Image: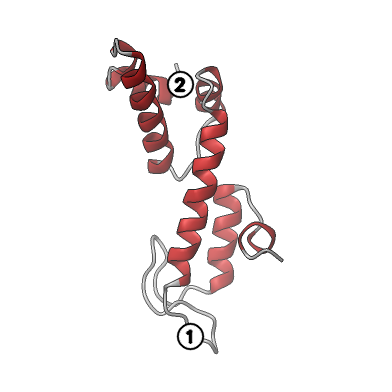
Amino acid sequence: MSKLLEYLHENKIDQIPDDQEFVEAEYDAVMEYCIERNFNISDEDMKTIISRALEDSFYNCKEYYVKDLWMEFGDIPMNSETECIEEDWREFPAGTHREEIWHWFEETFGISVAEDLMGL
């Protein structure tokens, strides 16, 4: 059983009798689960998402999440000479070079910073 499926069972999502309430609760629970994991989920969890017809919602939510995170990163002060952040951000301590964080975005979210976030 996927961890996402376990999460949905623990939260009794499948026991909600009202269709509209179920759909909303299922969507909210799946997206919350994915956000808590930075959308870094297992193949098994993705199968659960697909089986519940939430694949498009997953990718849309992921796109907004990554862009919001990029904007948040853009608000972090950076030394223009060293290109290192001047205060802690997420798991990155002050002094981390911007390219290290860019690589984290690319590796964590399977995106290209230049193409997907900077439009280059």
Which quarter of the image is occupied by the N terminus?
A: top left
Q: Residue at x 41, y 80 (%)?
A: 86
Between residue 60 and residue 48, name the one nearer to us: 60
Whether residue 33 sits left or right of residue 84 in the image: it is left
Q: How many C-alpha atoms fall within 10 Å of the one at disc 1: few (<14), some, or many (≥20)?
A: few
Between residue 79 and residue 28, name the one nearer to us: 28
Which quarter of the image is occupied by the C terminus?
A: bottom right
Q: How many C-alpha atoms fall within 10 Å of the one at disc 2: few (<14), some, or many (≥20)?
A: some
Q: In which quadrant of the rendered view does residue 28 lie? A: top left
**In the displayed structure, would residue 7 be above or below residue 37?**
above
Q: Residue at x 50, y 19 (%)?
A: 52
Q: Which mark is residue 2?
A: 2
Q: Residue at x 36, y 26 (%)?
A: 24
**In the displayed structure, would residue 10 be above or below residue 114?**
above
Q: In which quadrant of the rendered view does residue 15 lie? A: top left
Amino acid type shown at disc 2 = Ser
Instruction: First in sequence, mark 1 or 2: give its number.
Output: 2
Q: Does the residue at mark 1 contact the one at mark 2 (Cβ under 8 Å)?
A: no
**In the displayed structure, would residue 6 be above or below residue 116?**
above
* Residue 97 coordinates in the image, percent (x, y): 53, 74
Amino acid type shown at disc 1 = Asn
Whether residue 57 sits left or right of residue 37 in the image: it is right
Q: Which mark is residue 79?
A: 1
